Amino acid sequence: MAVIDLTSENFGTEVVESETPVIIDFYADWCGPCQMLKLVFKNLSETYDGKLKFARLDTQAEEHLAMQFQISGIPALVIVKDKKEIGRVVGYRDEDSLKKEIDNLLRK
């Protein structure tokens, strides 16, 4: 499944109205760990195809959305299910570590 680029225009449709849980990668282009996480995030999007929607949000372009989620450090991954945050992971993780954390959060 492709990773969705979130904007103010599609946030409601892709996240708020989504029947599938969504994991949002809050990032910035200048952030080294964010760039390292990009490939890990893309690879995991294929693993969870149909079970979890993967989306990225540029914190500089969509600062107000990042503020709504009280993002204070990036990369930050936030999982939203039924219009509520069910968990977050802050900082870079390798693919295996991130998969374990996602699985634990989705069990909630």
Image: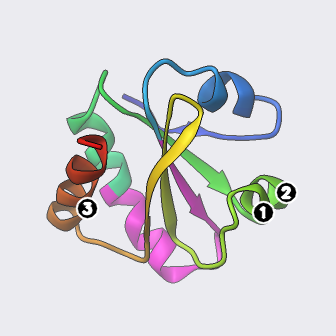
Residue 32, placed above or below residue 6: below
Which quadrant of the figure has residue 30?
bottom right
Please tell me whether mark 1 sits on a helix, a strand or a loop: helix
Which quadrant of the figure has residue 33?
bottom left
Please tell me whether mark 3 sits on a helix, a strand or a loop: helix
Amino acid carrying mark 3 in the image: Leu
Distance from disc 3 to disc 2, alpha carbons, whole Å, reads: 26 Å
Residue at point 62%, 27% (across, down): 14
Residue 84, placed above or below residue 25: above
On the picture, is 86 further left or further right than 26? Answer: left
Amino acid carrying mark 1 in the image: Met
Distance from disc 3 to disc 1, alpha carbons, whole Å, reads: 24 Å
State yes or no: residue 80 in magenta. no
Binning the other alpha carbons within 10 Å of mark 1 as few (below 14), some (14 to 19) or many (20 upward) gives few
Instruction: Give x and y (percent) for residue 60.
Output: 78, 65
State yes or no: residue 39 in magenta. yes
Binning the other alpha carbons within 10 Å of mark 2 as few (below 14), some (14 to 19) or many (20 upward) gives few
On the picture, is 102 further left or further right than 64? Answer: left
Q: Disc 1 marks which residue?
A: 67
**Residue 98 numbered tag:** 3
Amino acid carrying mark 2 in the image: His
Discs 3, 1 touching: Cβ within 8 Å? no
Q: Disc 2 marks which residue?
A: 64
Instruction: Give x and y (percent) for residue 1.
Output: 36, 28
Q: Where does the magenta region start and end?
A: 23-40
Upstream in sequence: badge 3 or badge 2: 2
Distance from disc 1 to disc 2, alpha carbons, whole Å, reads: 5 Å
For discs 3 and 1, the disc positioned in front in the rendered view: 1
